[in-house]
């Protein structure tokens, strides 16, 4: 309220000089051609038609200086003017705003405060976007207390439904239809601690109960704007205010017509609104989507339903939620486990005036109590209570474990026998059983692969990352199985528009999850036995691999015959698109190319050596190198990769797969492959990256234009040289990836001289080379030869 007095004084001062156009008075109504503009030129109030096609028009407030028309408030959203030319917006002598058309009153406020003409009432549009009716005694009646779908900075919105003046936010019915839809947002009617989005009368999303401890929540938008959320308790009422620092871009919080709440800032570079917080962001974030005793785990790459500790579900179907593994005894032997980092479930009892210990007793003394949570509330309420003890009786619904934000401990009651068993099991029972199982599994899998059986991968097959340190230290993170429906929606039902290309064994589609996360979905051709084998190969393999130069697998999906792999989406697609496209080629300057080369080398080194397994990719080529937005290369397509056991160095196959041109001679002709086959392909790739620039004559330009002291020509030659070493005919002569990485990264490391610099493709030549031994061909000569082309 304080802030209102100062502008009021200034405005009164101005009024004496000129008729300001930021206000309405009883003698000056607003007609369809007029508008009010706030004194600082921030907001406009006027008549508008959301689409030019419909005749319906409305009174609304929008940003004056934002080119994309954005409405923050609409007066007559459910009673539009159908004949726009006749509408009139007036402030009456009774301090009410009224919208009249020739026949009737379409919309009106009901203040009914009679004022005399001399002192007069006025409606003023402020720079905050607030339309206030200013009474002669200085009191304002604010549009901020009657929001439509938008909360603006500095708007103090009461959270409590007990406040009579307060109305929920109600979304527009459609992008061009301001009428009230079924989606609304506001505080819980039974407790003021939670905020809900409803779809009609059903909850659609729920913000976890207020933890009290943090009054100021800070959000940071993409553009760096910091948004403070202040929750204030005045007696039994709660108020929320969002504030941004002065000079920040425009910010708003709105309930979108799709039912999502969005925090948006205006981006003056892209001339669009950036949404930096959107809820519900994932399907399992929606109210109660994981069933009783299930929870939505948002800490992984893709949010998925899981069961609370001590509970289990019927496979991956969470429609019935989760059941206790061990029933409660209710004889005082049950115990509580602490689940940290949770967003508390819905349907709690709010018990007042308790200490933490009293809250614990409150729950442990009644066997129907399944969980409790406790928080200190920073401000006292009317009864002098600063505690917040929540207890749950019966089922726990709509629990979440978010990746960040405000969370708290949830204390969950489980049968203590399952706690004890867990401890004993760890020591005595499980280990031998697991060991036995592992041995049997190994034998079984060994037989199966020999028998060329192509049985389906089990749906419940769980995979573990070798290194899950990026998943909040949870060693047991499982590769999520993603619902087929979600993928259908994400890829627009596998529409051709979304197709990115055809990989080794199927098509690749671009998709967008509900959270806005972009994914690439690889669908493996169905029916063929090959497909199943490649699928299993790829899932098992990639799930274990974590390296910045390998494409990351986010999840998988098996639906009937359909087998899908979900990868991170990489913005710059594949390397061949750059190398062999005349226009895109110029994007690749030498620095980028060299970075790409080094990245591929590191990725390969990881595959060959550092990943604890020896993996031969077998199909390394430009189209299998994907590039992210920063042009970081990522090796993809592991459909043909092979894992080598401990001492195994080379293998033979009758089924030669791969791409001719990239294939080493011993593999193409005899089916022998080893890590050196990949070295060969890497050499070919090196030529394609380094030499193509060289041949195009770009190298010289680059050298001349270069401002760096270190001459890139050296680097180019070094790469060509390494490429030559890699494509040597005899596998043993080719360097290991570890030396290649070393040679690429250390510009002073000496380069060995290659023996034969071109590929001998027949046995005669091979034999001749053997007799000749290591002929000391000069590097310089080699390079001169190349330059000549
Ligand atoms: C509506 O008409 C105005 C003025 O004629 C024009 O600037 C605006 O682009 C039109 N909007 C749409 C959605 O067609
Ligand atoms: C307001 O009151 C004055 C005098 O009492 C009257 O002349 C005027 O018409 C009234 N205005 C409206 C909109 O009722
Ligand atoms: C406005 O208030 C007066 C008395 O203060 C009452 O007579 C009148 O009926 C009220 N009008 C409306 C529309 O409620
Ligand atoms: C919000 O209020 C603060 C303090 O009253 C003021 O400094 C700031 O300019 C206001 N912000 C907007 C967008 O009106
Ligand atoms: C101003 O008048 C209104 C309506 O009569 C009243 O509700 C409000 O309390 C008054 N404000 C002050 C500061 O007297
Ligand atoms: C909202 O409810 C309606 C009808 O109850 C339903 O058709 C619609 O799918 C719901 N919306 C969402 C996003 O679940
Ligand atoms: C999940 O289980 C329910 C009932 O048990 C069943 O109606 C539903 O079809 C199942 N959903 C899936 C995807 O299997
Ligand atoms: C809250 O609890 C304290 C002690 O536990 C007691 O003295 C006080 O009267 C209680 N307040 C209310 C409102 O019950
Ligand atoms: C336990 O809580 C339930 C639900 O609030 C209540 O009906 C029941 O009487 C309580 N039992 C005891 C022993 O307090
Ligand atoms: C609540 O506050 C008390 C004393 O200020 C402190 O000992 C306790 O740890 C706090 N509890 C929580 C859950 O923050
Ligand atoms: C996991 O990755 C991190 C860096 O991402 C690394 O520091 C750590 O050593 C890795 N752990 C294992 C077991 O590979
Ligand atoms: C680079 O190679 C040279 C020569 O082998 C060696 O002396 C130097 O230590 C290497 N530098 C790095 C950073 O490995």
Image (cartoon, helix red, strand yellow):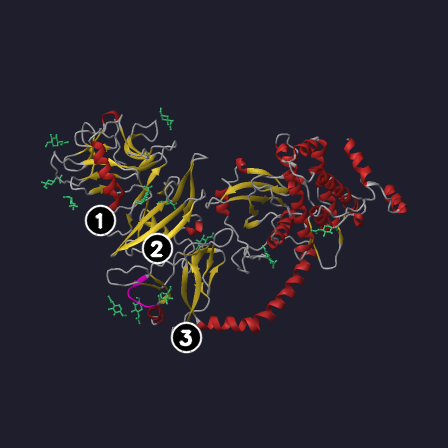
Picture layout, residue 363 above or below residue 120:
below
Closest to the camera, between mark 3 and mark 1, is: 1
Report which quarter residue 259 is drawn in: top left
Picture layout, residue 147 above or below residue 290:
above
Indicate the secondary structure of the residue bearing disc 2.
loop
Query: Image quadrant of ligand 8?
Result: bottom left
Is residue 445 among what the camera can see? Answer: yes
503 relative position to 106: left or right: right
* Residue carrying label 2: 215
Q: Which mark is residue 464?
A: none
Indicate the secondary structure of the residue bearing disc 3.
loop
526 relative position to 39: left or right: right
Q: CA distance from mark 3 to mark 1?
A: 48 Å
Indicate the secondary structure of the residue bearing disc 1.
loop
Picture layout, residue 511 above or below residue 556:
above
User: Within 10 angstroms of label 3, few (less than 14), some, or many (20 or more) residues?
Assistant: few
107 relative position to 779: left or right: left
Q: CA distance from mark 1 to mark 2?
A: 24 Å
Question: Which range of residues does the magenta coloring cover?
Answer: 349-355
Mark 3 or mark 1: name the one nearer the start of the chain: 1
Q: Which mark is residue 164?
A: 1
Q: CA distance from mark 3 to mark 2?
A: 38 Å
At 75% across and 52% down in the image, what residue appears? Answer: 651
At 82% across and 37% down in the image, what residue appears? Answer: 781
Does any atom of ligand 9 lie closer than 8 Å to the CB of label 3?
A: no
């Amino acid at each position: 309220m304080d802030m209102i007095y100062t502008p009021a004084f200034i405005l009164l001062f101005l009024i004496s000089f000129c008729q300001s156009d930021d206000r309405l008075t009883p003698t000056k109504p607003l007609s369809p051609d007029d508008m009010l503009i706030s004194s600082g030129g921030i907001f406009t109030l006027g008549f508008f038609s959301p689409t030019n096609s419909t005749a319906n028009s409305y009174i609304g407030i929008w940003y004056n200086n934002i080119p994309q028309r954005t409405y923050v408030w609409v007066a007559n959203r459910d009673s539009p003017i159908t004949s726009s030319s006749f509408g009139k917006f007036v402030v009456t002598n009774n301090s009410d705003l009224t919208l009249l058309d020739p026949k009737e009153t379409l919309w009106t406020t009901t203040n009914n405060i009679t004022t005399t003409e001399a002192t007069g009432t006025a409606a003023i549009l402020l720079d905050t976007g607030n339309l206030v009716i200013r009474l002669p005694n200085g009191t304002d009646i604010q549009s901020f207390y009657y929001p439509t779908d938008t909360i603006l900075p500095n708007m103090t919105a009461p959270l409590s439904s007990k406040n009579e003046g307060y109305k929920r936010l109600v979304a527009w019915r459609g992008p061009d239809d301001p009428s009230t839809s079924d989606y609304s947002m506001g505080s819980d009617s039974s407790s003021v601690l939670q905020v809900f989005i409803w779809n009609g009368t059903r909850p659609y999303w729920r913000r976890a109960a207020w933890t009290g401890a943090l009054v100021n929540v800070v959000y940071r938008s993409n553009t760096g704007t910091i948004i403070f959320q202040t929750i204030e308790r005045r007696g039994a009422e709660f108020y929320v205010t969002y504030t941004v620092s002065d000079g920040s871009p425009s910010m708003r919080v709105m309930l979108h017509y799709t039912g999502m709440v969005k925090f948006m800032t205006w981006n003056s570079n892209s001339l669009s609104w950036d949404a930096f917080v959107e809820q519900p962001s994932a399907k399992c974030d929606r109210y109660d989507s994981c069933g009783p005793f299930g929870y939505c785990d948002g800490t992984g790459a893709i949010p998925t339903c899981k069961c609370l500790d001590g509970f289990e579900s019927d496979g991956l179907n969470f429609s019935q939620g989760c059941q206790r593994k061990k029933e409660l005894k209710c004889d005082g032997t049950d115990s509580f486990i602490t689940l940290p980092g949770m967003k508390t479930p819905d349907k709690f009892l709010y018990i007042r005036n308790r200490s933490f210990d009293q809250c614990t007793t409150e729950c442990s003394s009644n066997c129907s109590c399944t969980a409790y949570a406790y928080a200190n509330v920073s401000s006292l309420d009317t009864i002098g209570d600063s505690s917040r003890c929540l207890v749950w009786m019966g089922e726990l619904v709509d629990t979440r474990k978010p990746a960040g934000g405000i969370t708290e401990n949830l204390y969950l009651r489980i049968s203590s026998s399952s706690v004890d068993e867990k401890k004993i099991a760890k020591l005595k029972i499980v280990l031998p059983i697991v060991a036995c199982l592992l041995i049997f599994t190994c034998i079984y899998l060994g037989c199966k692969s020999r028998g060329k059986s192509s049985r389906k991968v089990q749906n419940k097959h769980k995979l573990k990352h070798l290194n899950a340190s990026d998943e909040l230290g949870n060693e047991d993170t499982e590769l999520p199985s993603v619902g087929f429906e979600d993928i259908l929606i994400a890829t627009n039902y596998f529409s051709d528009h979304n197709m990115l290309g055809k990989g080794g064994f199927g098509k690749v589609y671009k998709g967008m999850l509900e959270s806005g996360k972009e994914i690439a979905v690889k669908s493996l051709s169905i029916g063929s036995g090959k497909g199943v084998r490649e699928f299993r190969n790829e899932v098992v393999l990639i799930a274990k691999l974590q390296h910045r130069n390998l494409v990351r697998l986010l999840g998988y999906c098996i639906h009937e015959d359909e087998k899908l792999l979900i990868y991170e989406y990489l913005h710059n697609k594949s390397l061949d698109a750059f190398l062999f496209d005349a226009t895109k080629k110029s994007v690749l300057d030498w620095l980028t190319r060299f970075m790409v080369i080094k990245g591929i080398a590191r990725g390969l080194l990881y595959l060959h050596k550092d990943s604890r397994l020896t993996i031969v990719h077998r199909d390394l080529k430009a189209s299998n190198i994907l590039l992210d937005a920063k042009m970081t290369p990522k090796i993809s397509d592991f459909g043909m990769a092979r894992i080598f056991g401990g001492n195994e160095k080379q293998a033979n196959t009758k089924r030669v797969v791969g791409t001719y041109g990239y294939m080493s001679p011993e593999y193409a002709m005899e089916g022998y492959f080893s890590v050196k086959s990949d070295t060969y392909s890497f050499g070919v790739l090196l030529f394609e990256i380094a030499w193509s620039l060289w041949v195009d004559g770009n190298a010289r330009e680059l050298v001349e234009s270069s401002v760096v002291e270190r001459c890139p020509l050296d680097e180019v030659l070094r790469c060509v040289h390494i490429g030559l070493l890699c494509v040597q005919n005899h596998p043993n002569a080719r360097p290991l990836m570890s030396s290649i990485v070393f040679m690429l990264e250390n510009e002073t490391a000496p380069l060995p001289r290659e023996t034969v610099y071109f590929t001998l493709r027949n046995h005669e030549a091979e034999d001749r080379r053997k007799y000749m031994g290591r002929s000391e061909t000069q590097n310089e000569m080699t390079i001169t030869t190349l330059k000549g082309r």
